Amino acid sequence: MNLIYPAIFTPLTNNPNGYCVVFPDLPGCVTQGDNMEHSIEMAQDAASGWILIDLEEGVGLPKPSARADIKLQLKDEFVNYIQLNMDEYAKKYSKKATKKTLTIPQWLNTAAEEKGINFIRVLQEGLKAQLGLSPDTKIMPAQYVDSKQNIENTTSL
């Protein structure tokens, strides 16, 4: 699912190349970047995280504002539309469980069930161990996330 939300970009006072980014339709969704490209990447990440929480909690998505309804406060501010690829973002960051079908020998299944072994926990612990992750890891670590966000489809007014 691709979504597009307007964002207000305000130049940073302490960095002439950076921007503070605010999403008027996503209360509290604010971020910043060191330059335009970084600001767009940070905006995509912040807004996608905000939306993913609503999707996972079953909350309806806010409707994007029309450009004409967005009032700018400062002379150097501008509106930029940010595209969110929620399917790709959810693959990397969703805490939602994914069902996997597993085939093991019958004798192994019987022995594990007799011992009361939790198959889900064993599989998760084994996968984390194979990946060299801490047993407490809850989200995909940075080394497994493609840090290059797709900003080519972002449209500026």
Image: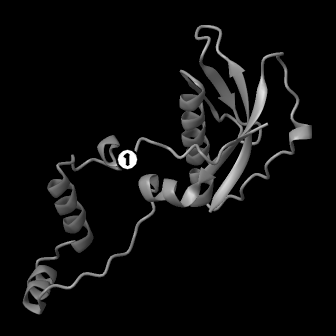
Q: Say left or right for 68 vs 79.
A: right
Seen from the viewer's position, the closer of residues 155 and 78 is 155
Snapshot quadrant of residue 8: top right
Q: Say left or right for 82 vs 130.
A: right
Seen from the viewer's position, the closer of residues 75 and 58 is 75
User: How is the structure coloured here?
Assistant: one colour
SS assignment at label 1: loop
Q: Residue at x 16, y 82 (%)?
A: 113
Q: Amino acid at mark 1?
A: Val
- Quadrant including the C terminus: top right
Q: Residue at x 56, y 31 (%)?
A: 37
- Quadrant including the N terminus: bottom right
- Residue at the front extreme? 152
Q: Residue at x 79, y 52 (%)?
A: 63
Residue 80, compared with residue 111, is above or below; it is above
Q: Say left or right for 10 vs 118.
A: right
- Residue 4: x and y in percent read 71, 50
Q: Say left or right for 78 vs 92.
A: right
Seen from the viewer's position, the closer of residues 117 and 14 is 14
Q: Residue at x 62, y 54 (%)?
A: 54
Snapshot quadrant of residue 96: bottom left
> Around disc 1, counting alpha carbons within 10 Å, would you say few (fewer than 14), some (14 to 19), or many (20 or more)?
few
**Label 1, on which residue?**
145
- Residue 94: x and y in percent read 46, 56
Seen from the viewer's position, the closer of residues 147 and 52 is 147
